[in-house]
Amino acid sequence: MRMAAIRGEHTVLIIIGGGEAKEGDAPILTRVVTLAGGGGARILVCTAASEEPEPAAAPYLRAFRRLGAAEVAALDIPHRRAASSPGNLRRLRDATALFFAGGDQIRITAVLGGTPLERLLRRRFRAGLLVAGTSAGASVVSSTMVVGGEAEVAPQMNAIRLAPGLGLLPGVVVDQHFAERGRIGRLLAALACNPRPLALGLDEDTAVVAADGRLRVLGSGAATICDGRRSAFTNVSETAPGQPLALAGVLLHILPSGYGFDLKRRRPLRPEDTRRAHAAGHKHESHASP
C-alpha cells in the first residue's frame, strides 16, 4: 500500500473494532470527520451490512453531524440493483468519505461485489476517498475476510470461516470485537492456514488509520498483530476438525493508542516513530503540492 502526494494516489483507511464512542469527544469518529475534510466533509454511511438499515445508520448520522461534517447521509444498498443505481453512484462520486456500519460483512460483499458501485468505490478510494468501517465494516476491507468462527477457544481446525473481502488493505486479515469476545484463537487459526498475511485484531473503541504503508492506533483499547511469516511449522494439513492446531514461532505485537506498525518492514512503531512518519508525510505533501 502506498500513499503519494495529495494530487496523486492517496489511500487512507480507518478500521474500527466496533463499540466506538459516539458521544462526548468521540475521538475515533472525530478522526473520520477530520480526515474526510473537517467542516467540508461529505460522509455517506453505508448500511449494506445490516438487515435494519435505519437503526444501523442513525447513531452515525447524529454523531457525524454533531462533530461538524458538512453533509451526512445514509447509503442503503439492500440488494444488488441498488448498487447500479445512478443516484447512488452520483452520491458516492460526490462524497469525501464512505463509512461502513456494522452488521454482517458477507452482506456487504454479496451486494457490492462486481457491481458499478464497487468499481466506483475502488477508483474513488485510489483517488483520495476516505474509507472507514466499524465491526463488520472493518473485516470487509481485507482481501480475505473473517466471516465467522469459534471464540474463546484455542486455535483449532475449523475454528474460523473465511471469504473474499473488498481487498482495500491487501496482506492483512482483520478481526474485530477482539479482546471482548476472545477471538485470538480464530485469528491464529487463520494464520495456521496461511502464514503469509498479517493478522490484525482490534478491540472495541479502538481503530487503526492505515496510510503510507503504516498503521497508527487510536482509541481506548489495543491492536493485536500476529505475524506468522517466519513461523517454524504448523500441523494444519494433518489435523482433524475440532482438534488443536500446532503453530510455532508466531510474532505477537500488542499496540495501544499512539503506537503504529510498518506494514512493509513488518515492525512495530513507537509513538515517537509514528509522529516522525506523520510529520514527514505532511512535509512531502506540502512540497509536492503546487
Image (cartoon, helix red, strand yellow):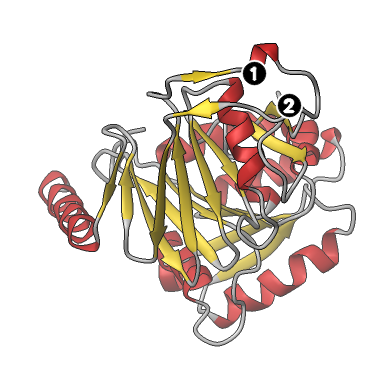
Location of the N terminus by quadrant is top left
* Residue at the farthest top position: 238
Residue drawn at (14%, 52%) of the image: 280
Disc number placed over residue 157 in the picture, else none: 2
Q: Is residue 109 left or right of residue 72?
A: right
Q: Is residue 264 above or below residue 94?
A: above
Residue located 26% across and 33% down the image: 265
Query: In the rendered structure, are the residues bearing label 2 and label 1 in contact, judged by CB atoms less than 8 Å apart?
Result: yes
User: Residue 93 location in percent, x, y?
Assistant: 57, 44
Residue at the spot of label 1: 236
* Residues at marks 2 and 1, CA–CA distance in whole angstroms: 7 Å
Q: Residue at x 60, y 70 (%)?
A: 20
Q: Earlier in the sequence, mark 2 or mark 1?
A: 2
Question: In this view of the protein, can residue 85 be seen by the observer?
Answer: no
Q: Position of residue 88 (x, y in %)?
A: 72, 45
Residue 145's disc is: none
Image quadrant assignment for residue 35: bottom left
Crowding near the residue tagged with mark 2, few <14, some 14–19, many ≥20 C-alpha atoms within 10 Å: many
Q: Residues within 10 Å of mark 1 (few under 14, many from 20)?
A: many
At 78% from the left edge and 18% from the top edge, which residue is drawn?
240
Q: Amino acid at mark 2?
A: Met
- Which sits in the foreground, 15 or 251? 251
Q: Nearer the viewer, residue 263 or 72?
A: 263
Q: Is residue 26 above or below residue 169?
A: below
Disc 1 marks a residue whose amino acid type is: Val
Where residue 121 sits: x, y (%)? 58, 37
Where does residue 210 sit, x and y in percent of width and height? 40, 47
